Image: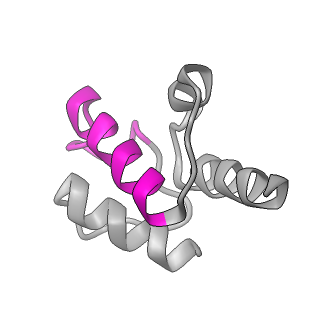
């Protein structure tokens, strides 16, 4: 799952240097518009829906991974 998230992020954010420690602050292209595109792609890929509060908390690869893991375990 981690690799899939990173690949989606590389594509949406047009950044190649993304890893588990990457954050919104460390990636220049991670702006608000691309954040919404990222959320949409992740929802499609993992068949989940994020609440507005969750979207606001998605500020790092680790946070996204934890959130999706939590959502998938609720299924």
Residue for point 53% across, 63% down: 46
Asked if residue 42 is positioned above or below residue 35 in the image, the reply reads below
Asked if residue 12 is positioned above or below residue 2 in the image, the reply reads above
> Splitting the image into 4 quarters, where does residue 25 fall?
top left
Magenta stretch contains residue 37: yes
Residue for point 49% across, 78% down: 3
Front residue of 75 and 22 = 75
Q: Which residue is outermost to the top?
A: 53
Q: How is the image coloured?
A: one colour
Asked if residue 22 is positioned above or below residue 54 in the image, the reply reads below
Residue 12 percent coordinates (x, y): 23, 56
Q: Is residue 35 left or right of residue 74?
A: left
Front residue of 30 and 51 = 51
Q: How many marks?
A: 0
Front residue of 47 and 31 = 47
* Range of magenta residues: 24-45
Q: Is residue 44 left or right of residue 46?
A: left
Residue for point 44% across, 65% down: 45
Q: Which residue is outermost to the right?
A: 74
Residue for point 27% across, 43% down: 37
* Most common SS among magenta residues: helix
Q: Which residue is outermost to the left?
A: 14
Residue 36 percent coordinates (x, y): 31, 35
Magenta stretch contains residue 41: yes
- Quadrant (top left/top right/bottom left/bottom right) for the C terminus: bottom right
- Quadrant (top left/top right/bottom left/bottom right) for the N terminus: bottom right
């Amino acid at each position: 799952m981690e690799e899939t998230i990173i690949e989606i992020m590389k594509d949406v954010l047009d950044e190649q240097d993304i890893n588990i420690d990457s954050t919104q602050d460390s990636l220049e292209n991670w702006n608000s518009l691309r954040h919404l595109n990222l959320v949409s792609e992740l929802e499609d890929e993992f068949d989940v829906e994020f609440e507005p509060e969750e979207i606001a908390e998605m500020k790092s690869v680790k946070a996204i991974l934890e959130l999706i893991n939590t959502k998938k375990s609720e299924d």
